[in-house]
Image: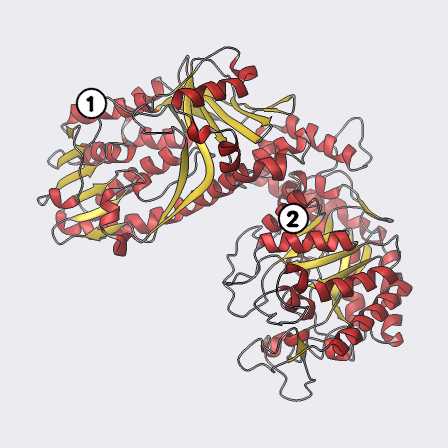
Amino acid sequence: MRIVCIGGGPAGLYFALLMKLRRPEHAITVVERNRPYDTFGWGVVFSDAMMRAMKAADPISAADIGYAFNHWDDIELLFKGTRQRTTGHGFIGIGRKYLLNVLQRRCEQIGVELVFEREAASDLEYPDADLIVASDGVNSRIRERYPESFRPDIDMRPNRYIWLGVKKQFDAFTFDFRRTEHGWLQAHIYKFDRETATFIVETTEETWRAHGLDELDTDGSIAFCERVFAETLQGAKLMSNARHLRGSAWLSFNRLICGGWRHFNGRSHVVLMGDAAHTAHFAIGSGTKLALDDAIELAKQFDAVGHDAARIGDALAAYEDLRRIDVARIQNAARNAMEWFEVVGHRYADTLEPEQFFYSMLTRSQRISHENLRLRDPLWLEGFERWFAKRSGALVPAKGRPPPPMLTPYRVRGVALSNRIVVSPMAMYSAKDGLINDFHVAHLGARAMGGAGLVFAEMTCVSPDARITPGCLGLWSDEQASGWKRLADLVHSVGAAKLGVQLGHAGRKGATKVAWEGMDQPLETGAWPLFSASPLPYLLNSQTPRAMSRADMERVREDFVAAARRAAEAGVDWLELHCAHGYLLSSFLSPLTNQRDDEYGGGHEARARFPLEVFSVVRAVWPEDRPISVRLSCHDWAEGGNMPDDALIFAEMFKQAGADLVDCSSGQVTNTQRPIYGRLFQTPFADKIRNEGDVATIAVGAISEADHVNSIISAGRADLCAIARPHLADPAWTLHEAARIGAPIVPWPRQYASARAQYEANIARIGAAS
């Protein structure tokens, strides 16, 4: 085959090398716009796994590269006058110039043609090529020629950074955060040879402009950074090797995702590789890894289908399918880390204590979890857990393992939860006339004995026409209240759990069948009239509600007051007001469902007016020493709907009105929603509201392991974690997860205590066998 690699970065050079090694008869050219052995940038970061893959692909170049590697295990944080360090992380650094020079020499040795100082503007300049590899970077001119095939999605991120070097040794991957009069700047520092380290300085656009960095040349920017990080530099001078850049040396990161990676131009197959196909933010140091992995995988696919021009299309298709999965995984982690650094100043650095800030930084990509940190550095994590437990008011033994964060107490007003686990409200659709029956007592009683700190019943309706289905619980009568007293007495008698009630009104989503007969489908008989913020049906075949009148609002408000009084008299410990998921109060908050032109429609304050009215009257009758939380849909997942920034505004309003926590859910406001699901996918909403709005939060959504909870609570992303489906599968989820991670003693119900030793022994036996 005739192969031309346009762009002499890691992807193009390594692919050329691997293909030439496999088939010396291939005619391969690498075209590079820079001069021979001339490259820019400082150090790049590798992993041990990447090094093993390179040794398998080409032992000779891997040996030359490995000779120059600098390995370190520690991460150090300089923050608010503290210096913290943890070990066991395993990084490898190498100079970018050295890496490329090794690959250039190796290519020359085996017969790859290297063409330097040549700017290839088009793939059509090489009509005799069977395969053209577009490895010409994030600003790829080849990719720009075929937008219909490659479908690039480029997002210019808001932060600014400058890539510098320093002749100073650092024995750890060092992060240095400095607060200035205009905001925070952070440095990412790591060594890559025996005397030089990469020194990346990053900050927000606002801070960058406020300091006048947009008006400084490279020398001026370097002088500024030397002043800010003088304590760390200790007199060492920062250096730039990007003098080729015009204007400011500060850059903005472009996040690139391509819908397609291959194209046939009529003569040649064209494929994207490296930064031309995808980018990963330097916050997790995977850009070079992705480029090299691309080269390795495409070479493997030619091995699989054959090194023949007729099979190029098959090889490219398989390459794209396989690489897309791994790239998406790494890009997701890189995005999490990138976004953490973009908001780090006002969200974390201003609010968190140094110990919790360090934990948050270490877990920013969500690839490193609580138990993963224990594997890396058990002494450091135990010290953190001890600090967190003492801070939470837990009794911490002088010796032995402290309780993990999920099992630390949490106090709100006069209610003390024994731990951070909440059994989330889950609709059971098993009531008749809104009454608690034996099913509810058995169902909720089992979960109260299962170790959770707080157990919620399902959304409980404040009037017969507030129900979602005929099977929903209610609190509009004294008979229903007596059932709640029975439930509260049971929960309080079987363990340490507290009981919560979630009061709500279905609004336009009412009068539907129970879930197993047709989720959200309207009742065929026995339906009741509906009202909502605006006369908009939820589904095309749903009943159309009428727009609420002022009289309707006053009646609903009093229904909530009466239900809250009954719940308090029944002995319920915690009340949550349901303002999410498209139900009545939620329908006022979202612009998708509130199209009113009176004082209850329009901007945030107007849309929140009625929900806040309801909250205020409920807070007035609910006992002062008992908490109230508010459940919000923090993202409508639909164009024109509420976004996390809107949810933050509403959360602050409810806090001002007296709410103690916000339960951060999302979606279900409109049937046109397009949620992006995934592990802990709603936790960022709780994180934002807690740390930007100073509002305590409950995280919900795809939280299924103790590791998840410990990571969320430790990093300060939420104060409590509400867990739903895992509690349906396992009523004793908290007890079992505590046993699985080997947590200190958690009391089991005395009636079940005899099973505990056997359960823990079985876990230990399984662990030993694996």
Considering depth in this image, is 571 or 42 the residue closer to the camera?
Answer: 42
Q: Position of residue 755 (x, y in %)?
A: 77, 50
Q: Quadrant of the N terminus?
A: top left
* Callout 1 secondary element: loop
x and y percentages locating residue 187 in the rendered image:
51, 26
Question: Which circle, 1 or 2, is nearer the viewer?
Answer: 2
Q: In the displayed structure, would residue 527 be above or below residue 559?
A: below
Looking at the image, which residue sits at the far bottom?
525
Quadrant in which residue 83 is drawn: top right
Q: Is residue 762 visible?
A: no
Color encoding of the figure = secondary structure
Residue receiving disc 1: 36
CB atoms of marks 1 and 2 within 8 Å: no
Residue pointed to by mark 2: 689
In-front residue for pair 424/234: 234
Mark 1: amino acid: Pro
| Relative horizontal placement of residue 527, taking residue 26 as reference (left or right) | right
Residue 138 place in picture, x, y as percent:
32, 40
